[in-house]
């Protein structure tokens, strides 16, 4: 494995662990659940890259940050196309998603609004505003995961 990838992978594991809920493991996964997981994973490279900048681990390159934020905003919508109950298994997704659809939809909308705000702040180049918007996006992830995700 490329040594340069280790910090990014470690950050990803920590991010996902930090957004955990009850600590239970994933259940069986069917094709819908696999598609949902793949869609969430598709947005992580940009999110993690932006996180390194926000945390001061990498220098702020406004053009690169704008591109990452735009890609993240586009990819962040994709997982929500795959929240049908999968009879073959839902992985980490809790039944609460389907038991409380209005609450889940509200979390989805809150997340998309936070992502759109992050993208707008990134396009402006105002680094202090970007940091606040990035934090808000992370808080939205955690809020949803604490109720609707088992780990």
Image (spheres, grey):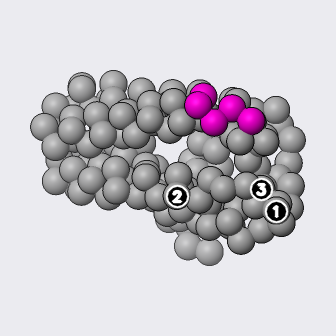
Seen from the viewer's position, the closer of residues 77 and 101 is 101
Q: Name the residue under label 2.
A: 81
Report if the CB atoms under discs 2 and 1 are less than 8 Å apart: no
Looking at marks 2 and 1 on the same chain, the residue that comes earlier in the sequence is marked by 2
Task: State the image coordinates of residue 46 (x, y, percent, origin top left).
Answer: 40, 55
Q: Mark 3 points at which residue?
A: 90
Residue 9 is marked as none
Q: Which residue is drawn at 47% across and 58% down?
A: 78
Task: State the image coordinates of residue 11 (x, y, percent, origin top left).
Answer: 57, 48
Per the image, label 3 sits on a secondary structure element best described as loop
Q: Relative to residue 82, is residue 20 depicted above or below?
A: above
Q: Which residue is drawn at 82% across and 62% down?
A: 87
Q: Residues within 10 Å of mark 2 (few under 14, many from 20)?
A: few
Looking at marks 3 and 2 on the same chain, the residue that comes earlier in the sequence is marked by 2
Residue 102: in magenta span: yes
The boundaries of the magenta stretch are: 99-103
**Figure quadrant of the C terminus:** top right
**Figure quadrant of the N terminus:** bottom right
Task: State the image coordinates of residue 146 (x, y, percent, origin top left).
Answer: 69, 30
As measured in the structure, the alpha-carbon distance from the residue carrying label 2 to the one carrying label 1 is 17 Å
């Amino acid at each position: 494995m490329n040594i340069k990838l280790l910090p990014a992978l470690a950050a990803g594991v920590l991010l996902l662990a930090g957004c955990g809920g009850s600590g239970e493991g994933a259940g069986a996964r069917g094709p819908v659940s696999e598609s949902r997981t793949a869609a969430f994973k598709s947005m992580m490279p940009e999110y993690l890259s932006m996180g390194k900048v926000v945390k001061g681990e990498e220098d702020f390159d406004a053009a690169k940050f704008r591109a990452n934020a735009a890609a993240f905003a586009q990819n962040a919508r994709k997982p929500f196309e795959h929240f049908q109950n999968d009879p073959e298994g839902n992985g980490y997704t809790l039944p609460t998603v389907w038991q409380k659809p209005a609450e889940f939809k509200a979390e989805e909308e809150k997340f998309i609004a936070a992502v759109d705000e992050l993208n707008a702040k990134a396009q402006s180049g105002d680094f202090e505003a970007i940091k606040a918007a990035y934090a808000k996006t992370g808080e939205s992830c955690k809020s949803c995961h604490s109720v609707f995700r088992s780990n």
